[in-house]
Image: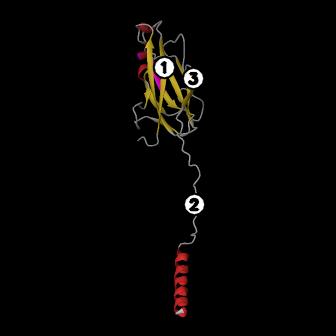
Amino acid sequence: MIKFALVSLLTAGMVGSFAATDSLAVFTDTKINGANTFSSGILSIADAPASAVVTLANMTPGDFVVAPLVVTNNGTLPLRYALSTGTTNVDAKGLAGQLQLTIRIKGPGVCADEDGAILFGPAALNTGFLGSNAQGAQAGDRALAAAANETLCFKVEMPTSTGNAFQDATTTATFTLDAEQTANNP
């Protein structure tokens, strides 16, 4: 009987030791993957000079002026831009419709009368545009990579056919650049 009790005790101890092995510690590991950071890009367009691009007083038929406008993407995102022209005739003579505007992309030299490929014109100053400020890609929109720039050459001319009705006339023109992101904006 003692022998049976000892065998029973021994058997119970072995079964207990197997059960105890199953409930002992298990190796584990945890890794936290740092602070994931997200930031948005910057869309920023600039022009130089920031004041008047082309100005000419006392024009006569056949006179013209050519001047550069440097358009710069100061942002971190690629962009496309459009240009529109707004004019104001300070008198009733309509000089803005008489003056001819030509916009060229600067060629290898300085902005000159015939330097670079024509992007707009020659056409009436009050109709000047490149692309469209409507959202999405439009014909004529200009693309600039981040931190890139390009030079546009503006030529404003009083045609030789301009008549006496435009003597002592004045107009002002503003050129507006509208930019938008190109990524995820077809």
Nearer to us: label 2 or label 3: 2
Q: Taking the image as drawn, is residue 90 in sight?
A: yes
Residue 155 in the image: x percent, y percent? Answer: 51, 23
Q: Amino acid at mark 1?
A: Thr
For the residue marked with disc 3, what is the amino acid? Ala
Marks 2 and 1, the one that precedes in the sequence:
2
Q: In front of the other: label 2 or label 1?
A: 2
First-in-chain label (3 vs 1): 3
Q: Are marks 2 and 3 in contact (CB under 8 Å)?
A: no
| Badge 1: residue crowd in 10 Å (few <14, some 14–19, many ≥20) | some
- Which residue is tagged 3? 50
Q: Which residue is mark 1?
A: 174
Indicate the quadrant containing the C terminus: top left, top right, bottom left or bottom right.
top left
The reply to whether the C-beta atoms of the residues labelled 2 and 1 are less than 8 Å apart is no
**Residue range highlighted in magenta:** 97-102
> At 44% across and 9% down in the image, what residue appears?
166
Q: Residue at x 59, y 52 (%)?
A: 34
